[in-house]
């Protein structure tokens, strides 16, 4: 029995060491922000006795967070001149418009603090590229048939998934390369991001051979349009 005591004691010591290590690692992990929030940019405007600081904030459209923080000793009211947003902040409080206004759309947004101090937020076009793909299981169908076109819309991970609802994929078509592409449909919007982006899909029923192309647009004018490669669907006569 004696020869086991040192071993058991050593095992207990190691056990307590492991428990302590797990506790430390847990505290570190809990103290860190989530991966998603850490990737999103955050902008802050301070409300001071002499007005907002910075008085002019420039940022890029897309995902992220914009906050005002009251560093004064009195309550202040922030009011946008276009009437889209107004809120009050008590001393030490932080807040915003409660949605993605005004960071989702390109433009200059002016506001006042207590109707006296002037400030503005200038939102510029997001310079990061987007991509959209288009493909199908086959290039040839029988007349009267249909084919499922599908692909992926992808954009930088710093943009939250909810922005996808304002970036629909538009399907364009033309009969041959001598004609211009024309809009034929706006695809159904994906609800979840997959491993390679946001999937989109739509069935088409071409009556003749057609060349399709997908275009990723932006209802908020925050991004440059993205185009897929052309995809040709050949319609053959029934035998």
Image (cartoon, helix red, strand yellow):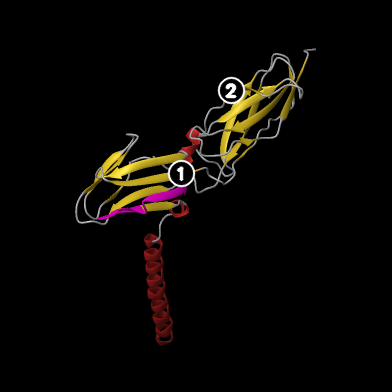
What span is colored magenta in the figure? 45-63
Query: Which is more N-terminal, label 1 or label 2?
Result: 1
Which quarter of the picture shows residue 215?
top right
Looking at this view, is 205 or 214 the one in front?
214
Q: Is residue 52 visible?
A: yes
Res. 100 visible in picture: no
Quarter of the C terminus within the rendering: top right
Instruction: Kindly identify the residue that appears in the image at 58 percent across and 38 percent down.
Output: 224
The reply to whether the C-beta atoms of the residues labelled 2 and 1 are less than 8 Å apart is no
Residue that sits furthest to the left in the current view:
74
* Image side of residue 164 versus residue 97, left or right: right
Query: What residue is disc 2 on?
Result: 185
**Residue 5 placed where, x, y %?**
39, 84
Up the image or down, 104 lies above or below 14; here it is above
Across and down, in percent, residue 149 comes to 64, 28
- Give the quarter of the image for residue 82: top left
Between marks 2 and 1, how big is the CA–CA gap? 30 Å
Circle 2 crowding by C-alpha within 10 Å: few under 14, some 14–19, many from 20: some
Which element type, helix, strand or loop, lies under badge 1? strand
Which is in the foreground here, disc 2 or disc 1?
1
Q: Residues within 10 Å of mark 1 (few under 14, many from 20)?
A: many
Q: Is residue 53 within the magenta segment?
A: yes
Residue 132 locus on image (x, y percent): 62, 37
Tag count: 2
The residue nearer to you, when weighing 87 against 190, is 87
Residue corresponding to mark 1: 123
Q: Residue at x 55, y 47 (%)?
A: 156
- Compared with residue 140, is residue 34 higher up or lower down, i.e. above or below? below
């Amino acid at each position: 029995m004696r020869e086991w005591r040192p071993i058991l004691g050593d095992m207990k010591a190691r056990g307590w060491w492991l428990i302590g290590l797990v506790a430390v690692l847990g505290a570190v992990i809990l103290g860190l922000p989530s991966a998603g929030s850490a990737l999103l940019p955050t902008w802050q405007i301070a409300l001071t006795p002499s007005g907002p600081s910075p008085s002019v904030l420039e940022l890029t459209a897309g995902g992220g967070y914009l906050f005002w923080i009251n560093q004064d000793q009195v309550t202040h009211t922030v009011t946008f001149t276009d009437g889209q947003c107004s809120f009050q902040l008590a001393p030490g409080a932080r807040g915003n418009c409660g949605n993605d206004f005004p960071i989702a759309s390109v433009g200059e947004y002016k506001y006042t603090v207590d109707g006296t101090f002037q400030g503005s937020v200038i939102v510029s076009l997001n310079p990061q590229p987007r991509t959209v793909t288009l493909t199908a299981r086959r290039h040839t169908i029988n007349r009267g048939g249909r084919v499922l076109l599908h692909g992926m819309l992808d954009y930088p991970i710093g943009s939250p998934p909810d922005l996808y609802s304002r970036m629909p994929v538009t399907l364009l078509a033309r009969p041959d390369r001598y004609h211009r592409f024309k809009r034929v449909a706006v695809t159904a919007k994906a609800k979840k991001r997959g491993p390679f982006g946001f999937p989109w899909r739509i069935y088409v029923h071409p009556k003749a051979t057609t060349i399709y192309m997908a275009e990723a647009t932006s209802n908020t004018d925050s991004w440059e349009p993205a185009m897929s490669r052309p995809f040709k669907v050949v319609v053959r006569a029934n035998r």
